[in-house]
Amino acid sequence: MSDERIAVVEDEPGLQEILEFHLQKAGYEVDLYARGDDAWKSLQKTTPQAILLDLMLPGMDGLELLRRVQRHDTLARVPVLLLTAKGEEVDRIVGLELGADDYITKPFSPREVVLRVKAVLRRSGSKGSNEDQAEWLSVGSIRLDTEGHQVFLGDVEVVLTPTEFRLLALLLERRGRTQTRARLLSDVWGYADDIDSRTVDTHIRRLRKKLDPEAAVIETVMGVGYRIRRPLEGGRSTAC
């Protein structure tokens, strides 16, 4: 059994059982919660490696729970995957704006859920290309530490979700080159065929908000995608 713990916040007993079985089969520890308020109390004491979050919950709805997670110093770094029904598109978009890393639409296959969890955990644990050396990427007052998984505006740390961090790192690594939405979905999320490309736009908006007043360095290329507006000048350094 892996030491990676997944919190599943879902009030349907049948879905709870299915998710628990397949996640445990994949090697994860699983904590089950049927109520949003119960999940919030527990999450403040035990930090999981990822959260699977239904939006329609008793006690505290999924969006409110997500808001609290994103305001929490430790939990804000934990990737959150929303479990949404097809009719909950507006709530899903709001969830992505609030800080969710991904979403899975019901009905879903258990295999898809496991693959999405593995993908988001890879993103949250990704390192720089050289494991033995700290590598920095920077533009303007933005500095990104690929090894330490930290981002700074000047001397102030900016807390990003794992997906936001990976998105910013990729744009910095490919500075000056336009990245299409499809390419970003493939390289950041790990898939491109079954997820709305507006997800990229939502994450870019969130990233710009967190990086203000340097938000303008992420340039929109109309009808195509995004790129870092100006090249780095000595922005990459490697510390021995």
Image (tube, rainbow, N blue to C red):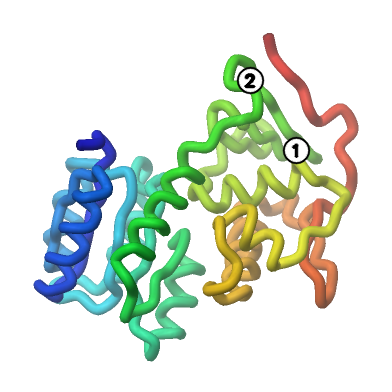
Residue pictured at 69% horizontal, 14% vertical: 239
Q: Which mark is residue 59?
A: none
Which tag is nearer the camera, tag 2 or tag 1? 2
Amino acid type indicated by mark 2:
Ala
Residue 232 occupies which quadrant of the picture?
A: top right
Say which element carries label 1. loop
Q: Is residue 162 left or right of residue 20?
A: right
x, y percent for residue 24? 19, 49
Amino acid type indicated by mark 1:
Ser
x, y percent for residue 235? 81, 31
> In the rendered view of the protein, which quadrant contains the C terminus?
top right
Tag 2 residue = 134
Q: How many numbered marks are there?
A: 2
Q: Which mark is residue 141?
A: 1
x, y percent for residue 187? 64, 53
Residue 223 occupies which quadrant of the picture?
A: bottom right
Residue pictured at 28% horizontal, 39% vertical: 4
Residue 107 vs 142, above or below: the answer is below
- Which residue is most to the bottom? 87
For residue 99, say whether it is visible. Answer: no
> In the rendered view of the protein, which quadrant contains the N terminus?
top left
Point out the tag, 2 or 1, that comes first from the N-terminus: 2
**Who is closer to the viewer here, 203 or 109?**
109
